[in-house]
Image (cartoon, rainbow, N blue to C red):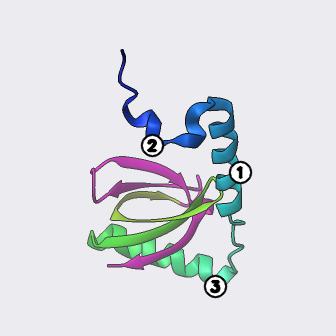
């Protein structure tokens, strides 16, 4: 006999297709539309990014990705406003993340 393990606690996962479909439906219900920023908000984000880059201060970044608003803390390493990208080092795993400036929703100094 083979033990069932954790399968007995996941009744909807008995059919993998059904579980995948339910997971997709739940994820679509949680999605939000990407907010449109005004010129003033974009200028404030640029000033905050440049200040954080020059002073090496920690920032709270809120960005839009795959229908979700995500907030992370970390440090700005590089900003290229002409290329529409910046490099962000997250505080938890110290990984370099390359993101587009158009994905940013809000930036605040910690």
For disc 3, the marked residue is: 40
For disc 2, the marked residue is: 9
**In terms of image quadrants, where is residue 91?**
bottom left
Relative to residue 2, is residue 14 drawn left or right?
A: right
Tag 2's secondary structure? Answer: helix
Measure the alpha-carbon separation of dots 3 and 1.
36 Å
Measure the alpha-carbon separation of dots 2 and 3.
51 Å
Q: Earlier in the sequence, mark 2 or mark 1?
A: 2
Q: Earlier in the sequence, mark 3 or mark 1?
A: 1
- Mark 2 surroundings: few (<14), some (14-19) or many (≥20) residues within 10 A: few
Label 3 or label 1, whichever lies nearer to me, is 1
**In terms of image quadrants, where is residue 78?**
bottom left
Measure the alpha-carbon separation of dots 2 and 1.
21 Å
Tag 1's secondary structure? Answer: helix
Badge 3 vs badge 1, beta-carbon distance below 8 Å:
no
Comparing 59 with 13, the one in front is 13
Can residue 9 be seen in the rendering of this structure? Answer: yes
| Furthest residue in direction top, as rendered | 1
> With respect to residue 97, does 39 lie above or below?
below
Label 2 or label 3, whichever lies nearer to me, is 2
What residue lies at 68% left-to-right and 66% top-to-bottom?
32
Image quarter of the N terminus: top left
Badge 2 vs badge 3, beta-carbon distance below 8 Å:
no
For disc 1, the marked residue is: 25
Residue 104 screen position, x and y as percent? 56, 66
> With respect to residue 100, does 16 lie above or below?
above
Relative to residue 95, is residue 19 drawn left or right?
A: right
Image quarter of the C terminus: bottom left
| Magenta residues (range) | 81-110
């Amino acid at each position: 006999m083979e033990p069932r393990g954790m399968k007995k606690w996941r009744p909807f996962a008995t059919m993998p297709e059904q579980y995948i479909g339910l997971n997709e439906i739940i994820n679509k219900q949680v999605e939000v539309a990407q907010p449109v920023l005004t010129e003033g908000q974009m200028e404030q984000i640029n000033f905050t990014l440049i200040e954080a880059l020059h002073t090496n201060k920690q920032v709270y970044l809120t960005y839009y990705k795959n229908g979700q608003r995500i907030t992370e803390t970390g440090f700005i390493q590089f900003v290229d406003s002409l290329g529409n990208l910046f490099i962000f080092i997250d505080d938890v795993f110290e990984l370099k993340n390359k993101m587009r400036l158009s994905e940013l929703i809000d930036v605040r100094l910690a």
